[in-house]
């Protein structure tokens, strides 16, 4: 209810110790001396000011990373030593779980319980996964047709530039730095301007764990300045980006125009969540609700096109409405809150514009449709039914708590319609019919399919998109490949008999 968001915001129990840039192991001001405010999404008020990195700071950070990679101890340490540092960093994160979670929720507006019980533990788990990889990365000896001994070396790629978004600040940080460090690279990472705080805290823990200076540099700042400088830097050997498809195109072009650094992209989505007619409706409603509303709807893989079989459609819509009305929206630091505010004013207004577009295009507004309360960036859990494929709300990524429910009649039809998207990030299925599940699983052009579940993010599971949802994969073994160079070595044999 509106009252729940009008109360005085709860004060997070954490101190903000780090607001400067982290370059070469030291917290420093930006070269320009400029700072920018990071805002509390509950109120729109300033939490603190952080140093604003720009091209000159990116140059300094890349130089430090270059030196750490070319001359420093990091790539030359034994893999076991690197592994131990990463394990220690994971232990420190686990020890400081609650402070990190508080910073994360304060800066991003996501429920504290979600940060503390789900996201930070996921980050720790992922760091341990990659710490475990450090001493298991090795090349091959392959058979040759001639009198040659042929080896394939797997070497770290060098200086990795990484650009991350605000929806899962620390999870995105971990997906990027985990594999890059496991392979022995040096890093310059630019955090999202909305959420700079948690990465600075955690980067310091990496140093406490023994990471050498210059291996992990963190730049807070804006996209067109700091981000673009990193993407187009001549001394950055690899770029990894997560964000919108539009910005993904920009950074890919910057990388191509500068030094052709290889790029991995994790971009937008409009993922189908398909409910077949055999589904237990109550469970299907709950799963589809979670698939869309989790994290205030701010997920690249959100199940944002809920396709429901016509036989159960009306009941599904009614029950989804009841569930949305029960959703607990409020101060993310209050116990039991499921949904906090959206990240900022820009996203807030964008979502309200899409809601208006939905109404204007003739979709039925089932519930919600407006802001919640009078301050901060809270939006009512919103549902549209009778949504048609050609409506903008069924095609664009809304990135907010707006569920669009579409009706379908048979499997072939829903396959065609689900695939008729420029995106291909993920899909959800809800059915006990194994044949239908198998058919859909093979037919859908997406990078991840969740069957009778959603948003499961095991460290070993590669994540990424088909089509305009991206290039390459993160997590799992696939992510390591993006941070390694491959070198073939052929040695002539004097005595080919052996
Ligand atoms: P959103 O619109 O959801 O904020 P973006 O794709 O714009 O998503 O942002 C994701 C990340 O990309 C952020 O760290 C942002 O600062 C950065 N970014 C935005 N524009 C550019 C750009 N022109 N060059 C490099 N990075 C950018």
Image (cartoon, grey):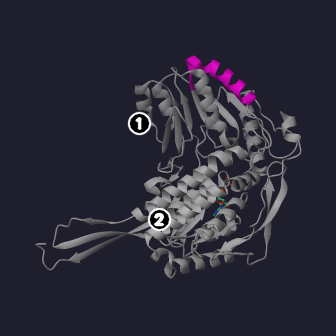
In the displayed structure, would residue 415 be above or below residue 66? above
Q: Tell me if mark 1 has few (under 14), some (14-19) or many (20+) residues whose alpha carbon lies within 10 angstroms of its own.
A: few
- Residue at 53 percent across and 64 percent down: it is 86
In the displayed structure, would residue 346 be above or below residue 368? below
Where residue 365 sits in the image (x, y, percent)?
73, 28
Q: Tell me if mark 2 has few (under 14), some (14-19) or many (20+) residues whose alpha carbon lies within 10 angstroms of its own.
A: many
- Residue at 57 percent across and 71 percent down: it is 211
Where residue 324 sits in the image (x, y, percent)?
72, 29
In the displayed structure, would residue 448 be above or below residue 98? above
In the displayed structure, would residue 452 be above or below residue 140? above
- Contact (CB < 8 A) between labels 1 and 2? no
Q: Is residue 33 visible?
A: yes
Task: Point out which mark residue 442 bears.
Answer: 1
Q: Secondary structure at mark 2?
A: loop
Q: Which residues are magenta?
A: 308-326
Q: Earlier in the sequence, mark 1 or mark 2?
A: 1
Task: Specify whether residue 316 is painted magenta.
Answer: yes
Image quarter where ligand 1 lies = bottom right
Residue 250 figure quarter: bottom right
Residue 46 figure quarter: bottom right
Q: Is mark 2 within 8 Å of ligand 1?
A: no
Foreground: 339 or 374? 339
Majority secondary structure in the magenta region: helix
- The single residue placed furthest to the left in the displayed view is 497
* Viewport quadrant of the C terminus: bottom left
**Residue placed under numbered mark 2 in the picture:** 483
Residue 198 figure quarter: bottom right
């Amino acid at each position: 209810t509106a009252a729940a968001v009008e109360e005085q915001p709860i004060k997070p129990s954490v101190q903000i110790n780090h607001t400067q840039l982290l370059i070469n192991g030291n917290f420093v001001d930006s070269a320009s001396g400029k700072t920018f405010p990071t805002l509390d999404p509950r109120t729109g008020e300033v939490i603190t000011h952080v140093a604003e990195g720009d091209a000159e700071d990116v140059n300094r950070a890349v130089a430090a990373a270059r030196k750490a990679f070319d001359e420093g101890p990091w790539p030359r340490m034994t893999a076991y030593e690197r592994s131990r540092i990463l394990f220690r960093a994971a232990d420190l994160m686990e020890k400081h779980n609650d402070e990190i979670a508080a910073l994360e929720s304060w800066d991003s507006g996501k429920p504290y319980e979600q940060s503390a019980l789900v996201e930070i533990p996921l980050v720790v788990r992922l760091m341990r996964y990659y710490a475990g990889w450090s001493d298991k990365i090795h090349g091959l000896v392959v058979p040759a047709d001639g009198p040659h001994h042929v080896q394939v070396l797997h070497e770290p790629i060098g200086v990795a530039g990484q650009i991350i978004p605000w929806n899962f600040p620390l999870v995105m940080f971990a997906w990027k730095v985990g594999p890059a460090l496991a392979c022995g690279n040096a890093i310059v990472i630019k955090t999202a301007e909305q959420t700079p705080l948690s990465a600075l805290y955690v980067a310091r823990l990496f140093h406490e764990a023994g990471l050498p200076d210059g291996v992990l540099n963190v730049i807070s700042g804006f996209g067109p300045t700091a981000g673009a400088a990193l993407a187009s830097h001549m001394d950055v050997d690899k770029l990894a980006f997560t964000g919108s498809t539009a910005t993904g195109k920009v950074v890919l072009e910057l990388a191509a125009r500068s030094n052709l650094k290889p790029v991995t992209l994790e971009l937008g989505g409009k993922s189908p969540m398909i409910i077949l007619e055999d589904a237990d409706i109550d469970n299907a409603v709950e799963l589809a609700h979670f698939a869309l509303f989790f994290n205030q709807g701010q997920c690249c893989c959100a199940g944002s096109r809920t396709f429901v079989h016509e036989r159960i459609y009306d009941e599904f819509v009614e029950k989804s409405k009841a569930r949305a009305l029960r959703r607990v929206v409020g101060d993310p630091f209050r116990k039991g809150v499921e949904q906090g505010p959206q990240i900022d004013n820009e996203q807030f207004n964008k979502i309200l514009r899409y809601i208006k577009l939905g109404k204007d295009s003739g979709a039925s507004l089932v519930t919600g449709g407006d802001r919640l309360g009078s301050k901060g960036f809270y939006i009512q859990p919103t549902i549209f039914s009778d949504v048609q494929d050609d409506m903008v709300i069924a095609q664009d990524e809304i990135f907010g708590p707006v569920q669009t429910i579409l009706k379908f009649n048979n499997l072939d039809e829903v396959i065609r319609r689900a695939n008729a998207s420029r995106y291909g990030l993920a899909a959800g299925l809800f059915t006990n019919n194994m044949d239908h599940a198998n058919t859909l699983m093979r037919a859908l052009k997406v990078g991840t399919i969740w069957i009778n579940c959603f948003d499961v993010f095991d460290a070993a599971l590669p994540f990424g998109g088909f089509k305009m949802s991206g290039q390459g994969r993160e997590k799992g073994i696939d992510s390591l490949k993006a941070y390694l160079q491959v070198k073939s070595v052929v040695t002539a044999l004097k005595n080919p008999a052996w």
